[in-house]
Amino acid sequence: MAINTSLKKVPMPAQDPLVRNHNFKEVTTGYTPEMAVEEARRCLNCKTKPCVEGCPVNVHIPEFIHLITEEKFEEAFQKITETNSLPAVCGRVCPQESQCEARCVRGKKGEAVAIGRLERFVADWHREHASRPPEKAVTNGHKVAIIGSGPSGLSCAADLAKAGYDVTIFEAFHTGGGVLVYGIPEFRLPKAIVSDEINNLRAMGVNLQTDMVIGRILSVDELLEDLNFDAVYIGSGAGLPSFMGIEGEDLIGVYSANEYLTRSNLMKAYNMEYATPIRKSRAVAVVGGGNVAMDAARTAKRLGAEKVYIVYRRSFAEMPARKEEVEHAQEEQIEFLNLENPVRIIGDERGQVKGMEVIKMKLGEPDSSGRRRPVAIPGSNYELDVDTVIVAIGTTPNPLLKKTTEGLETDRWGCIYTKDNGATSREGVFAGGDAVTGAATVILAMGAGKTAAASIDAYIRHKKAALSRTEI
Ligand code: FAD
Ligand code: SF4
Ligand code: SF4
């Protein structure tokens, strides 16, 4: 089939910005089969596969795209899932522009091949047309416990279940999915996709136990010693929000982004049929410049706020959020107050937020992260008229597992120390994802889950071999 020489990606259909900023339906609606084939024809099927090197789980990119050009969509899905168990998720939320697509040769002159959009298309096609759920592997008689059902726990569980392990995931919340469910909003990642992925894992024999806080109800030591799990994988994420430490953060109307998004996404505060309370805001300031800040701001707009500001102390160039998310937020009338920083949150006589004092900033010399350090401009303070403040400046791992697990070492931010293979300082205990790296990305968390699954398999086989030598 002839190569499509267009320098531009086939555009992604999307809801009108001024309609979608009043609903929670998915922003982009996905390629049709014709669009997918047209975009797939832009791929040069490069022998050296530079795009694959940019993918943390090494998806067989040229191969799956070639199958799309032949309209073999189910085969394309099977090709992707050889290395990636959550393609419908990754196709939507991976920072492709800095990973697979960053390495695409078509990107040297024009736009890269839309690898993420094609991955999403294939996964959605499979969801609509798949006739049977995945099969259960023959059991090998060994048990593995996984703490946390975010992307890293789910991908570790999928690989171990495929290898015949009896896998139990213990999840603190009442439903599985981690940040995919409680953090990333419905309008970016429909929750039905995550529950389908979890149902597939169930069909593979994985047991998901919800409302199980490990470290409170059971400890890691009990899992290993009393419940006879051969190994434990910790994929508990980094869900503890950081605050700015400024005056007024205890006022009514100040939220961490995690709490705000959890109320809206997991506890469906946007749906009148649910009783979850959430503030009816008139004007909202979201502090931060990452994906979490964009999600919180766009959620606040959809919940009815007239004005929503992103307050970020650097400029657009340093903003860590995905470019596409920043553009979507701008289209949805989120106002960006870049090079500005909160000084204090101002309360009224009832202890409710009535404004935020902000100071303007300029960029100085680069700091240790390589980004130019923001410096306050004296006397530039002013009061921003807001009744809600959402703090989205980062998260760290919850210290509960460190406190309750014998011999589990962490660094000073509470991130679990591991070797490259995911092994922690405690024998039989492995870890990965945000619990190890601090807040990062879905695909890195999944990559860590896969690495640990292979290491757990090797560890259990080695232990079994050593045991049988002793018995002889
Ligand atoms: P998590 O997804 O955090 O899952 C951990 C799970 O462990 C949770 O369900 C938690 O309840 C459970 N848990 C914790 N402690 C215990 C315990 N003691 N016992 C039992 N269960 C426990 N990344 C991207 O790549 N693209 C994006 O667009 C993007 N947007 C994001 C938007 C938001 C709002 C947020 C918060 C993050 C975003 N990220 C994004 C980051 C990404 O979601 C995370 O890096 C990823 O989810 C980490 O996966 P994980 O499995 O390590 O942890
Ligand atoms: Fe790209 Fe993410 Fe898919 Fe890898 S998993 S090919 S990084 S979209
Ligand atoms: Fe196709 Fe781009 Fe990968 Fe080459 S680098 S195989 S053009 S996706």
Image (spheres, rainbow, N blue to C red):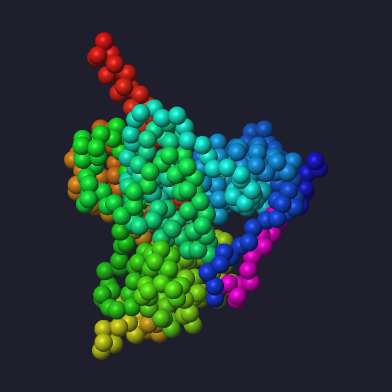
Relative placement, left or right, of 347 versus 451 is left
Q: Position of residue 239 (x, y in %)?
A: 33, 57
Location of residue 268 with respect to 139 vertically, above or below: below
Q: Quadrant of residue 380?
A: bottom left
Report if residue 17 lies within the magenta region: yes
**Could one spot residue 436 in this view of the protein?**
no
Predominant SS of the magenta segment: loop
Residue 365 to residue 429: above or below:
below
In this rendering, position of residue 220 left or right of residue 194: left
Q: Residue at x 46, y 49 (%)?
A: 198
Q: Is residue 343 magenta?
A: no
Magenta part of the chain: 9-21
Res. 62 image quadrant:
top right
Residue plotted at (41% across, 41% down) = 206
Q: 75 left or right of 162?
A: right
Q: Residue at x 34, y 30 (%)?
A: 142
**Is residue 378 rendered to the left or right of residue 467?**
right
